[in-house]
Image (cartoon, rainbow, N blue to C red):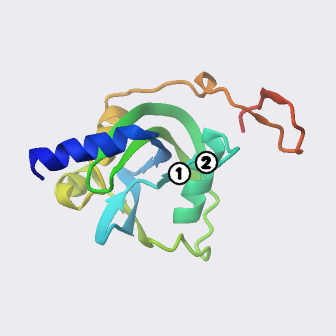
Amino acid sequence: MGAQDDELWVTIHFMVWKPSVTVAAIVERDRRFLLVEEAANGRVVFNQPAGHLEPEETLLDAVKREVLEETGWHFLPEAMVGIYLYPDRDEGVTYLRICFLGSCHGHEPDRPPDEAIIRVIWLTLEELMSMREKLRSPMVLHCIDDYRKGRRYPLTMLNHYLPAKSGASTMAPRKRS
């Protein structure tokens, strides 16, 4: 991209700028990390189980849903690892990723994964490091690095002011799920 392309991208991008809010999960078991191999933007890449926050969904509900939809595992969030802002110029999107760590239980191996998911795989850190060019974004290793450094933030930091699930129209804090 030339300077003129960069200037046009910045102009268009910031005219109506909103980040795309996503959640991601880090699960480590026996020195292996839970990942998905997926088709994204014409490439086959590796990523943590991750996806977009949906309307009227809490961040915790979103990460549980995404892990289940992509891997067939039920995810129990234990802490936040970090919040990451990543402008992906190839996609023309800025991602605001909230990364959680937790554990998996209750596997549903016959559950069909999301359409873009090729397979679920457990990889060592060494395997991940050797395939940097095949990772969906730099956030994949950044999240794992922060996890390995012991970065942990309590889930009590999260507050959601969403309509009650019963359909009530009042906006009150929703209990964490």
Distance from disc 1 to disc 2, alpha carbons, whole Å, reads 7 Å
Q: Are marks 1 and 2 in contact (CB under 8 Å)?
A: yes
Residue under pointer 2 = 62
Which is more toward the observer, 35 or 94? 94
Look at label 1 and name its amino acid.
His
Q: Quadrant of the C terminus?
A: top right
Left or right for 26, reference 127: right
Q: Secondary structure at mark 1?
A: strand
Task: Locate residue 21, reporting x and y percent.
Answer: 50, 43
Which badge, 1 or 2, is on the more N-terminal residue? 1
Q: Secondary structure at mark 2?
A: helix
Which is more toward the observer, 79 or 54? 54
Is residue 134 visible in the rendered image? The answer is yes
Q: Is residue 39 above or below residue 73?
A: below
Residue under pointer 1 = 52
Which is more toward the observer, 71 or 94? 94
Task: Locate residue 151, reporting x and y percent.
Answer: 39, 26
Is residue 144 visible in the rendered image? The answer is no
